Structure formats: C-alpha cells, structure tokens
Amino acid sequence: MEEKANFKKGKRKFKQTKQLVKLAINEGWSQSEVANACRTQQSVVSAWAKGTTQGTEQQLMPLLEKFGYKLRRNSFRVYWSLDSEEQKKTFHKIEGKIVLSHTFNRIESYNSKVKKVPEYRLIAHHQGANMFRLVFQSRLIFKGSSIVLQSTVDDAVWRSTISAQYDLLELLDVIDGHANEMEADKYPNDGYTLPFIARQALLNHGFDIAGVVEYPAVW
C-alpha cells in the first residue's frame, strides 16, 4: 500500500516545473545539463521551460534538491500565538502552499438581517514530500470584551496554534475528528461539511485520496 502511494506521489505533476527550470537556468545551467540531471531529453526540458508541459516530482528531484529552497522561500505565511494571561507573543513562519483554508462563522441576527462573524479558521499547508501542517486559528478579541480586533492585515487578527506534520491519511483523520468536534459545538453547519470541503480542496490540488470513488472521462 505504502509502495503504491509513493509511486503515485512520484508520478504527480509538479505545478512549479517552469519556475524550477528557470531557477536552474538563471544559476547558469544549460538545458542540456538540466536534461542530463533529470535523465530526459533537451526537447523535454525546453517544453518545461516554456510551461507547455510539466515534469513529475520524481523527474525533477535533482533540481528540487538543489533549488527547491528558493521556491519555498517565496511560499510562506507568518502567524502568531498569544498567551492569554501573560500576553506573550510567539511568531511562526510556515513554508508551503496553502491547500485548505476554511473559516467558521458565528451567525448574528439583527433587525431581520443576518451577519456572519468569522470566529475560527483552519488552514492546511502542503510542505512537500506528501507532508502537511495545520494551523488552528481563533479570532482575537479585546481583553474583557466581545469586540473583535480589526486590521488591514488579516492574519494579524488571529491567534494561531501550529500542529505537527502529518501525512495525507493523518491529515484527513485530524480534520475529520476536528469536524466532529465543531459539529457538536457551536458550528454544526461547518463541522458537518468540513470533510467534504477538505477532500474537494485536496483533490483540486492534485492529491490522490483513498476512498474517493472515481469516474474518469475518456478523451
């Protein structure tokens, strides 16, 4: 089972192929050198550089090992956590593309108008090698009141808790368990739909998810 998962992972198209090849060329590599490192033909590398085709993670591993950090440094988010008693601030920098971001809202009714107030958020970063990290966020409020903080920088108004790294199966288990808690708590709609939303987001980002019944088209 694990071998099959690793095989699928290696065959997955790498969406940043063009950027990765450009990094290598900007560092002085020729297309022939890229082709030799990736064990392919120069015509294939030329198509990668133009963005007309994408290589697999397995093909591009020699470039990822050498230049991958330059892609990662342009793909990160900054979060912070606040100790509610001491007001101690801890800052976190998480690398990797965001593959899921879902906000839980409190519903308020006033004069027949319905207002959604964001109170809680769940974010998932893909950090490469089929590993993920979750960020659990709660909206910051002024001490001793129910007034939420406001800022033009959205991430500044959320208290964040950072998870350990999970593989794909672990990630879904954690999300499903969290959804059950949310459903039983004060976010029944979001809790009930989160398992679907998470799988839809991950499938849209190209991940293979066990248990999803597929109906492929024939072109």
Image: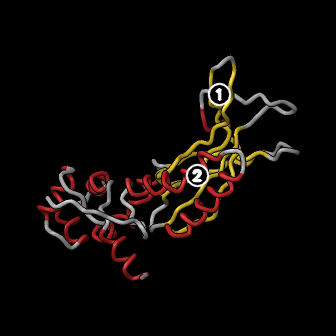
Q: Which residue is mark 2?
A: 192
Residue 161: image location, x then y, percent: 69, 53
Numbered circles on residues, count: 2
Camera-side residue of 92 and 170: 170
Tell me if 51 is positioned left or right of 161 in this view. left
Image height of 118 relative to 206, above or below? above
Element marked by disc 1: loop
Tell me if 217 is positioned left or right of 111 in this view. left
Q: Which residue is mark 1?
A: 151
Q: Quadrant of residue 56?
A: bottom left
Q: Residue at x 13, y 58 (%)?
A: 219
Q: Residues within 10 Å of mark 1 (few under 14, many from 20)?
A: few
Q: Quadrant of residue 146?
A: top right
Identified by mark 2, the residue type is: Tyr
Identified by mark 1, the residue type is: Ser
Most extreme residue toward the left, as rendered? 43
Q: CA distance from mark 2 to mark 1?
A: 30 Å
The quadrant of the picture occupied by the N terminus is bottom left
Element marked by disc 2: helix
**Mark sitting on residue 53:** none
Most extreme residue toward the top, as rendered? 111
Image height of 50 relative to 37, above or below? above
